[in-house]
Amino acid sequence: MYEDATVAVVVPAYNEEGLVGRTIETIPAYVDRIYVVEDGSTDGTWDEIRRTAQAVNEATNRTNGFERRVVPIQHDRNRGVGGAIKTGYLAAREDRIDVTAVMGGDAQMQPELLEGVIRPIVEDEADYVKGNRLLSREHASGMPRFRYVGNRILTWLTRIASGYWSIGDPQNGYTAISLHALETTGIEEMYEYYGYCNDILVRLNVAGMRVLDVPRPANYGEEESHITYRSYIPKVSGMLLRDFLWRLRTKHTAEGPYSMLGLFAASALAGLGGVADTIRRSDSAGEALGRLLVTLLLSGTFLVAALLIDRGNESHLDGRATTDAAEQPATTDESRSVPAATGQD
């Protein structure tokens, strides 16, 4: 428990043999429940989870009414990291956990930073908190160049789709969510592929949840990425477009022709109409180019106006950390990790 709030950590694990046990063992002692979700691994991940869970549970006294601190959960097939996190979220919601964080099973996420991720929720400053490696130039410098460029692109696409215009590093998996958000955000429908972290931001916005970024350094350890970029990019791009259109339809349909939805529609109609008119009426290349430029200017004006309206409408849900407190390790005795005893099932 952290300041009278129950805390859980979801640990999604796919082929993390040799790393997932270390992840479980180093989770801070104030965490009441650890849901380790094995997602159809083909190596010894499940056996390692069971051994470590038994050792930690035997070494930990029952707290806050829970018989077990570590709860191993196994999928019968690989559902993707979003599917594993969804399973953990639903378990935490059923157990009525106040704050639920996510730490990957690859031992990449520093456990000493967990306190800074959950604290804004405990103090009712946010409903969802996520790490952001782009808030600090020093932190961003530790990110490989190709990841940095891709991250910047996804940041802007996710801002447009989600309506959270101050967030960054949307692929950062170090997150925490409140029980209220788990109950109101439609977690059951959350995307199960790697784009889950983008999808949940759109769902949080539609539900009216406050989102806050906290600084977090880039850290690449022994883990291997399971992302195949040839399929990742088109899947996530398509998902973001669908989510964006869903958010527009859900939140802005009834706001009239001068709403963000109306201006986006005007932008699209101006663009399509201008192109069609150019094809039909232009007698020369110069005339065609002039008509296209006018079309782009008109369409772009509507588009910029729509985005500005959206940013203003959603600003009350959007925030950024103003201190580096999230980077400081916990200092209380309760924050020290629980060592696991050795043992077999």
Image: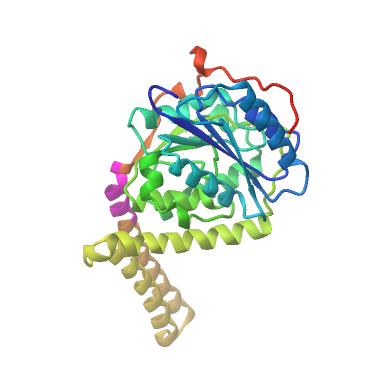
Q: Nearer the viewer, residue 105 or 202?
A: 105
Image quarter where the C terminus lies is top right
Position of residue 279 measured from the top left corner of the image (x, y, whole percent): 45, 84
Vertical placement of residue 285 versus 104, above or below: below
Vertical placement of residue 224 versus 217, above or below: below
Q: Nearer the viewer, residue 238 or 184?
A: 184
User: Measuring 69% from the left and 44% from the top, which residue is drawn there?
Assistant: 225
User: Measuring 56% from the left and 17% from the top, which residue is drawn there?
Assistant: 336
User: Measuring 39% from the left and 63% from the top, which residue is drawn there?
Assistant: 246
Position of residue 78 measured from the top left corner of the image (x, y, whole percent): 66, 54
Q: Residue 281: which quarter of the image?
A: bottom left
Asked whether, in this view, residue 76 is left or right of residue 65, the answer is right
Q: Is residue 293 magenta?
A: no
Q: Residue 17: which quarter of the image?
A: top right
Q: Nearer the viewer, residue 135 or 83?
A: 83
User: Measuring 69% from the left and 30% from the top, which residue is drawn there?
Assistant: 52
Image quarter where the N terminus lies is top left
Q: Is residue 312 magenta?
A: yes
Q: Main secondary structure of the magenta part?
A: helix
Position of residue 171 measured from the top left corner of the image (x, y, whole percent): 55, 44
The residues colored magenta run 307-316
The answer to whether one can see residue 241 in this image is yes
Q: How is the image coloured?
A: rainbow
